[in-house]
Image (tube, rainbow, N blue to C red):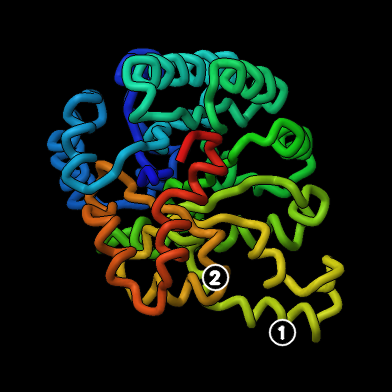
Amino acid sequence: MRIIDVHAHILTPECISIAGPLPAPDKDPFTFFTTPETAEVNRRMFAQIQSKLLTPEERIEDMKRMGVDMQAISPSPTQYFYWTDAPVGALLARMQNDRIKEVVDRYPTRFVGLGTLPMQAVDLALEELARVMKLGFAGVEISTNVNGIDLDHPQFAPFFAKAEEIEALVFIHPIGFTHADRMRECYFNNIIGQPLESTLAISRLIFGGVLERHPRLNICIAHGGGYLPFYPGRLDHAWRVRPECRLTPRPPSTYLSKLYFDSVVYSAESLSNLVRQVGSDRIVLGTDYPFDMGESDPVGLIERTPNLSSADRNRILGENAARLLKVER
């Protein structure tokens, strides 16, 4: 069985000359809600990991050290570029996807592609989705919102319908919280804000009816799905007692079983709780490679997690991902 990491990023530096300084500080909450200290730490961090984002050979050596056989590579969320005009966004998405294709073609047993889309223009996003799937990608990575518009907005309905139809994996990864005025210090917009973004995105997909309308959608949420898998009872209680929350035919928590979650939750206890909530058949290995908020010992985390059977571990380490990505085990 191959050990497969579904959460790993690469960078396409050629996009910077087109998009200008990255990310756009007035559009990207990850940069806008920050402090000079955090900006400097991030600058140093990116400088340290740049070669890992650019060089497949160095990446493969790190994979060997982590015990990972294959990565599903997706763009760095700093390069979503949703804030650009639609034609520019489409060009930047194509450039990044072509870069991913080059890496996958060079090392087809090591990598599988998850592309990016110009989600600010759904018609162009659908064109690029069709293209990357023809190129052999397993799916795409999108953010938890598009320029502040939540994913249950009707404008995204054609995207989710097509993703379900063609069985494309949709990997949802946040990039800061959109209203993080109180999260500037202490890197809170990442530490707290990113899981909060994922929590909100899942809640909107549930209450907005997206998961009800598209039961065969393959959606994986980064960072263990944020906070929601650890506190779903509050949604269910509101669904029972608040009429404005009765928007789905079943309690909200039941829709968690329609989603997948990566294992980037940092502790064996948290992973054990996630398994109890959603089941080992809905969890896939993740690292967030090569960022400093990632998991450097992903296999060890699975092995340390209590109350997992051998079958549970095998599902999380690779079997679930192989099924989602349509690769050999």
Occupied quadrant, residue 329: top left
Q: Tell me which residue sits at (79%, 42%) in the image.
A: 154
Q: Position of residue 208 (x, y in %)?
A: 77, 56
Task: Give above or below for 62 relative to 187.
Answer: above
Q: Tell me which residue sits at (48%, 71%) in the image.
A: 274
Marks 1 and 2: CB-CB under 8 Å? no
Task: Give above or below for 94 relative to 44.
Answer: above
Q: Is residue 121 left or right of residue 95?
A: right
Q: Nearer the viewer, residue 114 or 242?
A: 114
List the residue tagged with mark 1: 237
Q: Tell me which residue sits at (20%, 40%) in the image.
A: 64
* Callout in the foreground (1, 2): 2
Q: Position of residue 118 (x, y in %)?
A: 58, 26
Q: Secondary structure at mark 2?
A: helix
Which label's residue is closer to the chain start, 1 or 2? 2
Question: Which amino acid does the dot numbered 2 rest on?
Answer: Pro
Circle 1 crowding by C-alpha within 10 Å: few under 14, some 14–19, many from 20 = few
Question: Which amino acid does the dot numbered 1 rest on?
Answer: His
Q: Position of residue 9 (x, y in %)?
A: 35, 36
Q: Secondary structure at mark 1?
A: helix
Residue 229 shows which numbered tag?
Answer: 2
- Please indicate, yes or no, whether residue 194 appears anywhere in the rendered image: no
Circle 2 crowding by C-alpha within 10 Å: few under 14, some 14–19, many from 20 = many
Residue 180 shows which numbered tag?
Answer: none
Q: Is residue 187 left or right of residue 105?
A: left
Q: Tell me which residue sits at (47%, 20%) in the image.
A: 97
Task: Give above or below for 25 relative to 222.
Answer: above
Q: Position of residue 307 (x, y in %)?
A: 40, 79
